[in-house]
Image (cartoon, rainbow, N blue to C red):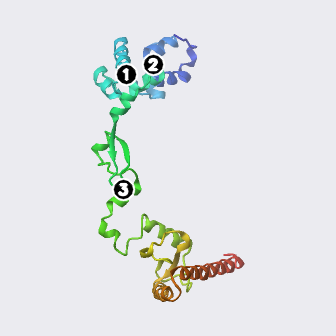
Amino acid sequence: MMTYKRGTLKKEGKELLLRGYSVSEVAEMFNSSRDTVLTYNKKFWKVTLRKKMTDEQIQIAKQMIIDGYTYKEIAAVVGFTPSTIADKNIENWRLPYSDIQVSKKLVERYCLTCGKKFFVRSQKLKYDACNYCCKKCSHLGAIKVDKINKPIFRGYRWSYLSLEVRKKIPFCQRCLKTKNRLTVHHIKPWRLDGTNNRENLLVLCDSCHKYLEDASRVMFDLIGLEDSIKLIQINFSYRLEAIKRCLTKLNL
């Protein structure tokens, strides 16, 4: 066992306690009394002291790890917490935590939205059904089928996306008003397989939104869908660039 100078107890004793040494071992290393170490810990270090494992308990824990038992199962036999046994294994024993223990903690599940196979911890199943592999599938799985077919549905995370677009462009792109309530318009309608890409979105007030909806229907009938979309995109991109140039000249 290593020995230290007596005057260095206050400086280096805390680190030894944190590494798992007992009070008696620290006192022996520094050639000091056990009461001195306890006094230093109570006044300065305030380290939670751990009960030392006996040689018999260590042998039992090692053998159970080799046999494929989990830390929780070993803790029930040895009488220490799973975290203590894990720390002992990582710092001192270094026995491989085999696939047997890992497989005991994982449960095979299938996503109800996309059908993908995934694994979750058995502990998590006590608090969550774990029916979805990711947040997107969870969101889509929570939406009822009849809601998806309604005109109000605009895809995954639409409310967050529309808010982000309105923050970047806080005015109507047609009349430039800011006081009216703003909405986000799809140039190629969602019902006609339009996307939520930034090039397909416009920020409009309610009156301009209604005007453009009516005008778009007329344009779709006269010159076709694709030509109408290109014409609207060019028109409003030119408007937005002109506004940006004006704001740059005004240093706004």
Q: Nearer the viewer, mark 2 or mark 3?
A: 3
Quarter of the figure with residue 46: top left
**Spatial CA span between label 2 and label 3:** 42 Å
Q: Nearer the viewer, mark 2 or mark 1?
A: 1
Quarter of the figure with residue 143: bottom left
Query: Which residue is depicted at the point 57% across and 84% down?
Result: 176
Position of 228 compared to 127: left or right? right
Q: Which residue matches tag 2?
A: 93
Give the mark nearer the N terminus: 3 vs 1: 1
Amino acid type, mark 3: Ser
Q: Residues within 10 Å of mark 2 (few under 14, many from 20)?
A: few
Q: Secondary structure at mark 1?
A: helix
The reply to whether callout 3 and callout 1 are in contact (CB within 8 Å) is no
Quadrant occupied by the C terminus? bottom right
Give percent across and percent down for residue 113: 35, 56
Give the answer, above or below, for where 222 lies relative to 159.
Answer: below
Q: Secondary structure at mark 2?
A: helix
Position of 194 compared to 79: left or right? right
Query: Which residue is depicted at the point 56% across and 14% down?
Result: 6
Quarter of the figure with residue 148: bottom left
Give percent across and percent down for residue 202: 53, 77
**Spatial CA span between label 3 and label 1:** 37 Å
Amino acid type, mark 2: Trp
Amino acid type, mark 1: Ile
Give the answer, above or below, for where 171 lies relative to 218.
Answer: above
Query: Which residue is depicted at the point 39% across and 23% down?
Result: 50
The reply to whether callout 2 and callout 1 are in contact (CB within 8 Å) is yes
Give percent across and percent down for residue 32: 49, 12
Give the answer, above or below, for where 141 lies relative to 81.
Answer: below
Q: Which residue matches tag 1?
A: 65
Give the mark nearer the N terminus: 2 vs 1: 1
Q: Which residue matches tag 3?
A: 138
